[in-house]
Image (spheres, helix red, strand yellow):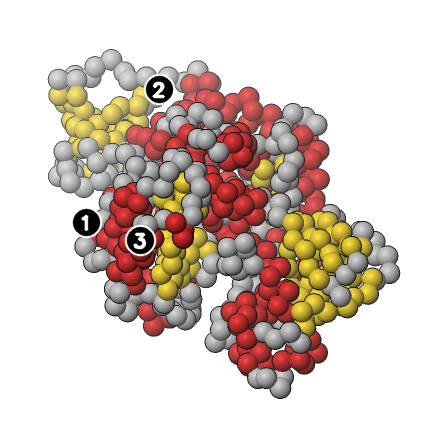
């Protein structure tokens, strides 16, 4: 790669995400997808959700429903129950210094194939996305508008659209997608060269500095936790420029801390805002007819009437911002919006501002769950554990650790990540963690028994749950199939060495340290048992979403743990000397079940018995099995004896 600045960014990115062992082209694919989609989908972006592996023509696909990246059909079904918006985002990334129009046309051709009806014609790596696409269109009556499609081609060179003769050909191909009837409200394409993708990387890292004219403002008196605060009015045109990306798109990443997503143009409140903009006599009254917006920034540098902002978020005013952006062509020079601007790095104050400024209209309980004061307790606990050699940092607010050198992304623990670990390990339901974390918050915060981040929860439970999951991820890198079973493995390890790690248990500091010591000392052996149990089941990829699979694995690990305890106590569980031919009675054991065989406890011994029947024996039942030539066999036609 010839672009020196981009090469430096890619190296920094690879170090932070520990991708040094991957080839540069694969690093660049991840880097490009991160730059394109992370800022707008901070809480739902994951590399595994958008990457397409060895797919020819497409290096990334992100399907969003209501602004959430979805790669699971069940999640798509949950998010399409009410009215919704959908977008299809595709990427292709090349480290080449030269634009290759042939590669771009191949890219568009694959996308076009994706929107046709023949699933078998679609590359295998895109078929899961294809199924989600089909579901979205099956719910067409709930779509607020037809889906949008965005095609992004990234390469490391310098691109000049007006000088590139391929542009008309590309546009013609994009038009051929637009012409597919009744499918899209918009199909857009863009080529990102090295400079453009570098700008997107800074936006994704929340490093962009923007300047705004704040002509009519007053400074508020000193406020505890805030370096400065201002209130005043800004021209609506200038405000829209502030919340736009350099590409002209709305920077949705600026609204991540706003607890309500955009509710759509047809929402009654948003219709009234739009009506004011479209009514010429009402436009200059906008500042008094609208509640305005609240901006929290890490740095505010005033210079006369111009304010330079960095690390900022719009924490209240998401609806107003979207309506202004959608109607920017109608904004006049006499339209102003009220802006409250707070400069602070105090995330406690930031959270308080978010909670209070969003309390004037209905906000669901789960929307505010991740800004509860309890999260400070968790952060303090994580900080205290770093003095004992653990490197985890709890990220209470987005971008909290951006720009801090020497911190690997694997050590940053966000609230969505912690939710998955806690549900898997402490609540023992790893089959649910594929859902979007907002859906999980909504489900688990219905009652106190399953409430997440409850004030009475001992914070060490969250730390220990994450510690197990993090160690499983680190240990599973050499097993590709294990990526789908991280959270199940963590639960099986917990059941072996830390069964008291569950919500509602009485955990104190002493008990936590004992529990953590066992995790560190016994992790390796417990991991191997869990990994082998899962591998022996020969499970399908999506079986990790099935509750009965979780129950079966728990049953297996209980049996394995019991056998381990028996061996430690000196009990023999070895297979006895070969029995003579004949019939014997044993009790069906809960361990080592498969369609073709199962285990039977015969006195102090465990025997593997061949199942010659289409039926499965009942665990705990006494059965009659036959021994012949040293092999045990059971047929359901034989007499089944009830347990005493």
> In this image, 309 relative to 565: left or right?
right
What kind of element bears circle 3? helix
Q: Is residue 145 above or below residue 553?
A: below
Q: Answer yes or no: is residue 240 visible.
A: yes
Q: Give the position of the N terminus as an image quadrant.
A: top left
What kind of element bears circle 2? loop
Spot occupied by residue 245 in the image (x, y as percentages of width and height) = 55, 55
Q: 212 or 545, which lies in front?
A: 212
User: Which residue has dot 3 on it?
Assistant: 170
User: Which residue has dot 2 on it?
Assistant: 573
Q: Answer yes or no: is residue 63 visible.
A: no
Are circles 2 and 1 on residues that touch, CB within 8 Å?
no
Judged by depth in the image, the label closer to the viewer, 2 or 1, is 1
Q: 597 or 484, which lies in front?
A: 484
Q: Residues within 10 Å of mark 1 (few under 14, many from 20)?
A: few
Numbered label attached to residue 121: 1
Spot occupied by residue 472 in the image (x, y as percentages of width and height) = 47, 31
Q: Is residue 275 above or below residue 587?
A: below
Mark closer to the chain start, 1 or 3? 1
Judged by depth in the image, the label closer to the viewer, 3 or 2, is 3
Spot occupied by residue 314 in the image (x, y as percentages of width and height) = 64, 59
- Tell me the residue at 30%/27% (across/down): 601
């Amino acid at each position: 790669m010839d672009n020196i600045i981009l090469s430096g960014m890619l190296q920094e990115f690879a170090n932070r995400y520990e991708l040094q062992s991957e080839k540069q082209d694969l690093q660049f694919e991840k880097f490009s997808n991160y730059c394109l989609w992370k800022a707008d989908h901070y809480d739902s972006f994951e590399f595994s959700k958008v990457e397409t592996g060895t797919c020819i023509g497409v290096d990334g696909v992100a399907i969003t429903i209501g602004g959430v990246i979805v790669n699971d059909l069940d999640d798509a079904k949950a998010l399409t129950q009410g009215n919704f918006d959908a977008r299809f985002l595709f990427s292709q990334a090349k480290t080449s210094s030269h634009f290759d129009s042939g590669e771009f046309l191949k890219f568009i051709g694959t996308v076009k194939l994706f929107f046709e009806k023949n699933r078998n014609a679609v590359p295998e790596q895109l078929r899961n996305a294809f199924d989600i696409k089909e579901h979205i269109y099956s719910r067409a009556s709930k779509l607020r508008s037809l889906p949008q499609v965005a095609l992004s081609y990234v390469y490391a060179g310098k691109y000049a659209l007006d000088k590139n003769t391929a542009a008309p050909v590309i546009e013609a191909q994009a038009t051929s997608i637009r012409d597919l009837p009744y499918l899209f409200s918009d199909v857009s394409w863009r080529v990102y060269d090295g400079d453009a993708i570098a700008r997107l990387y800074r936006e994704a890292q929340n490093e962009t500095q923007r300047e705004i004219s704040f002509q009519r403002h007053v400074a508020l008196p000193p406020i505890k936790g805030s370096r400065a605060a201002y209130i005043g009015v800004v021209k609506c045109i200038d405000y829209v420029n502030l919340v736009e990306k350099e590409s002209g798109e709305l920077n949705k990443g600026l609204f991540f801390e706003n607890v309500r997503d955009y509710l759509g143009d047809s929402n009654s409140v948003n219709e009234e805002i739009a009506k004011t903009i479209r009514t010429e006599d009402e436009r200059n009254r906008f500042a008094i007819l609208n509640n305005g917006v609240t901006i929290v920034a890490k740095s505010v540098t005033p210079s006369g009437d111009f304010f330079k902002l960095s690390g900022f978020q719009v924490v209240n005013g998401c609806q107003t911002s979207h309506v202004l952006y959608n109607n920017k062509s109608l904004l006049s020079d006499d339209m102003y919006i009220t802006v409250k601007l707070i400069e602070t790095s105090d995330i406690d104050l930031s959270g308080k501002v978010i909670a209070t400024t969003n309390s004037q209209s209905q906000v669901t309980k789960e929307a505010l769950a991740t800004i509860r004061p309890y999260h400070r307790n968790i952060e303090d606990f994580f900080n205290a554990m770093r003095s004992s050699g653990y490197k985890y940092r709890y990220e209470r607010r987005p971008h909290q650790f951006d720009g801090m050198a020497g911190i690997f992304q694997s050590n940053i623990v966000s609230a969505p990540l912690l939710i998955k670990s806690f549900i898997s390990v402490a609540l023992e339901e790893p089959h649910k963690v594929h859902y979007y974390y907002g859906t999980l918050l909504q489900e688990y915060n219905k009652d106190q028994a399953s409430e997440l981040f409850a004030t009475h929860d001992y914070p060490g439970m969250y730390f220990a749950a994450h510690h197990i999951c993090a160690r499983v991820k680190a240990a599973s890198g050499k097993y590709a199939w294990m990526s789908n079973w991280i959270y199940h493995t963590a639960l099986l390890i917990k059941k072996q060495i830390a069964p008291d790690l569950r919500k509602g248990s009485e955990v104190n500091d002493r008990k936590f340290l004992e529990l953590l010591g066992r995790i560190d000392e016994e992790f390796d052996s417990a991991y191997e048992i869990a990994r082998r149990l899962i591998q022996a089941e020969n499970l399908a990829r999506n079986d990790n979403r099935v509750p009965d699979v979780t129950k079966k694995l728990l049953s297996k690990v209980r049996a394995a743990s019991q056998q381990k305890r028996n061996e430690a106590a000196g009990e023999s569980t070895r297979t006895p000397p070969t029995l003579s031919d004949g019939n014997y009675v044993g009790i069906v054991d809960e361990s080592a079940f498969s369609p073709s065989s199962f285990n039977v406890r015969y006195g102090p011994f465990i025997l593997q018995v061949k199942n010659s029947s289409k039926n499965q024996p009942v665990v705990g039942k006494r059965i009659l099995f036959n021994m012949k030539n040293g092999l045990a066999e059971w047929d359901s036609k034989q007499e089944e004896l009830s347990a005493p």
